[in-house]
Image (cartoon, coloured by chain):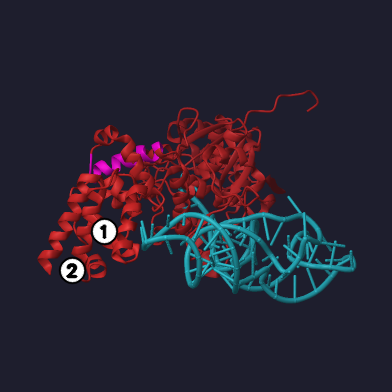
Amino acid sequence: MTAASPAKRPRVRFAPSPTGFLHVGGARTALFNWLYAKKYDGVFLLRVEDTDRARSTDESTRAIFEGLEWLGLTWDEEVVYQGANVARHYADAHRLLESGAAYRDFTPQSELERLRAEAEARGDAFKFDRTMAELSPEALAEKLANNEPYAIRFRVPEGTTEWPDLVHGRIAFPNKDIEDFIILRSDGTPVYNMAVVSDDIAMDITLVMRGDDHISNTPKQILLYRALGAEVPQFGHVPMIHGTDGKKLSKRHGATAVGDYQHQGLLPQAMLNFLALLGWSPGDDIEVMTLPELIERFNVNGLHAKAAVFDTKKLEWMNGQHLASIPIDEVAAIVAPLIERAGLATVSELAARHEWFCGVLELLRIRARLTDEIVAQAGLFFTELVEFDADAVSKQWRDADATANILEKTHARLATVDSWEPAVMEDALRKLAEELGISGGKIFQPLRVALTGLTVSPGIFDVLLYVGRERSLARIANAVSYLRQSS
RNA sequence: GGCGGUAUCGUCUAGGGGACUAGGACACAGCCCUCUCAAGGCUGGAACACGGGUUCGAAUCCCGUUACCGCUACCA
């Protein structure tokens, strides 16, 4: 190019087939494409590859949309449904037939299967032999006149097909290892590689970034682009995600659907952050990043060629990091509906005491890795009285009588405190401990059980503050009478 | 079997000829902090698959071996 031609605006796509939920591997491929588009001022497109009518379902298509939307990986143009384009796929295949780049193959499928089985029995690899399909003009005319079914096969030329892969560098395939593959089935429907190339050309895709498992499709697709007279896009093959046993991630490894993580209390930004780091590295030691930071720092040089193992422990840690650092209002917005679903309070009730609710969340979020854990630990802030956990009772209330006495004194002291502030209460109770000649813990631990029913909770003075004066005193009184009865 | 890809702590990774006694993070262990639990801080154990080259010098470049993964359909 001699003249200064403006660089083409990048166009990338995510092209899942709707045969299940949105898999974490797919989500990561989508993320890399999305990140690329955001980073390089490009366009991110979504194409639903629904040409396998037997396996594709609307339900799955919806699940993919929902997963993508939850993650915030939104697409820039209308969704393309591959199934709507079969007429073009068919036409492109026929263009190839007319130009001589492809030919008709009348070999029955059963014959192919037989030959393949035979070769396999011999321990050989079966490769379609072009001469099998050679027909004299008369024979061809006769078969055509008889309406005999035929598939269209691509005539793979001599030579080598290679491309500079964005993540792997140069990859080359000798064409002799590629068989004349079918592009149009005998029923007139297009085969995967044909449909993909036809659509990617139509969508003006400039970079095809997809899973490693497509590497061996790529030379076939490049050949198709050339035969169709289209510009070959860039390719980048990102590695697969494996389970802890090094095998392809599957249900055996636990949750693999993005939706599963959503329902387990993951934050989308944590999921994205974690996924980004599986197969990509910014090049330094910074790991916890917000979405804008991810976009800012993303670059194709950091993309890896090696498969990564999905480590849920690190994912949860990552979630904890995000949970602890995002604005508290954001946490409130996410957790409020979960609190409502748990039957603790309604969203509007929470909105009415927004500040109080955020205070509670501040206490809980630092101790939780998943939003579900926050909900599980929030109960004590919403009920009147609490149930005393048996283990907590036996551990912290071993001597019922003595404990009741201490709790009674604690109650009396708190009832007369000037202000219901943590520092003031702490001061008062530490003084009480000193007067009684015991350590602070001897007061705090039994008090914790009285207030929460448990041995673990946020700091006891924060609990007092957020449970509130009335309820706190009532719970302590209740604990005292419980202990008196059992002694 | 054929073709292709990959190879640094258990896991995610930094590293692109000398700065490497191989750095960080998760997980694990210990300590500190401390009213419990977290969070946080500190410390510890833990890796360049193997063999040949190239080079004054290799985790880094080349070749081979091995292992693992993927593809090998009128599936996508």
- Give the residue displayed 65% in from the left and 32% down from the top: A229
In the picture, residue A138 is in which quadrant?
A: top right
Q: Are marks 1 and 2 on the same chain?
A: yes
Residue A211 within the magenta-colored segment of the rendering: no
**Which numbered circle lies on residue A458?**
none
Q: Secondary structure at mark 1?
A: helix
Q: Nearer the viewer, residue A455 or A343?
A: A455
Magenta span main SS = helix
Magenta residues?
Answer: A329-345
- Give the residue displayed 55% in from the left and 33% down from the top: A92
Amino acid type at image mark 1: Leu
Question: Which colour represents chain B?
Answer: cyan
- Give the residue displayed 62% in from the left and 54% down from the top: A305
Q: Quadrant of the N terminus of chain A?
A: top right
**Which numbered circle lies on residue A400?**
2
Residue A343 within the magenta-colored segment of the rendering: yes
Instruction: Check the image and report above or below for A119 versus A324.
Output: below
Tell me which label, 1 or 2, sits earlier in the chain. Answer: 2
Cα distance in 3D space between marks 1 and 2? 13 Å
- At which x and y percent is residue A175? 67, 51
| The chain coloured red in the image | A
| Residue A102 as seen in the image, left or right of residue B31 | right
**Which numbered circle lies on residue A447?**
1
Q: Which residue is outermost to the front?
A: A435
- At which x and y percent is residue A153? 56, 44
Q: Secondary structure at mark 2?
A: helix
Residue count near mark 2 (Cα–Cα under 10 Å), binned few <14, some 14–19, many ≥20 = some
Amino acid type at image mark 2: Ala
Q: Nearer the viewer, residue A244 or A357?
A: A357
Q: Nearer the viewer, residue A211 or A341?
A: A341
Judging from the image, mark 1 belongs to the subunit labelled A
- At which x and y percent is residue A274? 50, 50
